[in-house]
Image (tube, grey):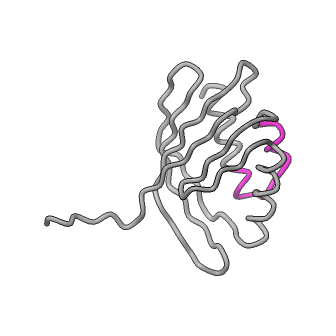
Amino acid sequence: MNKKEQIIRRYFDSWITGEVSVLSETFSENAVYIESYGPLYRGLDNIIKWFENWNEHGSVLEWKIFQFIHNDKTVICEWFFKCVYDNKEEEFNGISVISFDSENKITLLKEYQSKLPNYEPYR
């Protein structure tokens, strides 16, 4: 497993453990994070604020990585996510496009979501 994959795995695990200190080790000060359904967090301080606020309402039950695809300073990560938020359980598949700087800090993370269950409308 390479360094970028280790960083991503540690970050995903921080959502399960609630370990906020991982964010300062993972993201650059000017990082941008775009969630799969639209919210954008600009800067490490806002990413930390979002993490803390989210964890007051919910908990991540599982964030499983299926594969990594590498391209220079960008990694694409395919995953499954399951959580409880405001007493409602939710799960979906997703992809993150994650860009790193020369110090292996995340500068941009964009998520894309595929709702579950998938269905075949023409079947």
In this rendered view, identify the residue nearer to me: 65 or 75: 75
Q: Is residue 123 above or below residue 1?
A: below
Q: Quadrant of residue 106?
A: top right
Q: Residue at x 59, y 35 (%)?
A: 98
In this rendered view, identify the residue nearer to me: 42 or 3: 42
The quadrant of the image that shows the C terminus is: bottom left
> Where in the figure is residue 71, as x and y percent of width and height?
50, 22
Q: Residue at x 82, y 36 (%)?
A: 25
Q: In the image, 108: left or right of 44?
A: left
> Where in the figure is residue 93, as x and y percent of width and height?
46, 56
> Where in the figure is residue 107, as x and y percent of width and height?
69, 32
Q: Is residue 75 above or below residue 19?
A: above
Q: Residue at x 54, y 43 (%)?
A: 96
**Count of number-bearing discs:** 0
> Where in the figure is residue 89, as x and y percent of width and height?
56, 75
Q: Residue furthest left?
A: 123
Q: Quadrant of residue 114?
A: bottom left
Majority SS type along the magenta span: helix
Q: Residue furthest bottom?
A: 87
* 64 is within the stretch colored magenta: no
* 18 is within the stretch colored magenta: yes
Tell me which segment is drawn in magenta.
13-26
The quadrant of the image that shows the N terminus is: top right
Q: Is residue 77 above or below residue 58?
A: above
In this rendered view, identify the residue nearer to me: 23 or 10: 23
Q: In the image, 64: left or right of 85?
A: left
Q: Quadrant of residue 39?
A: bottom right
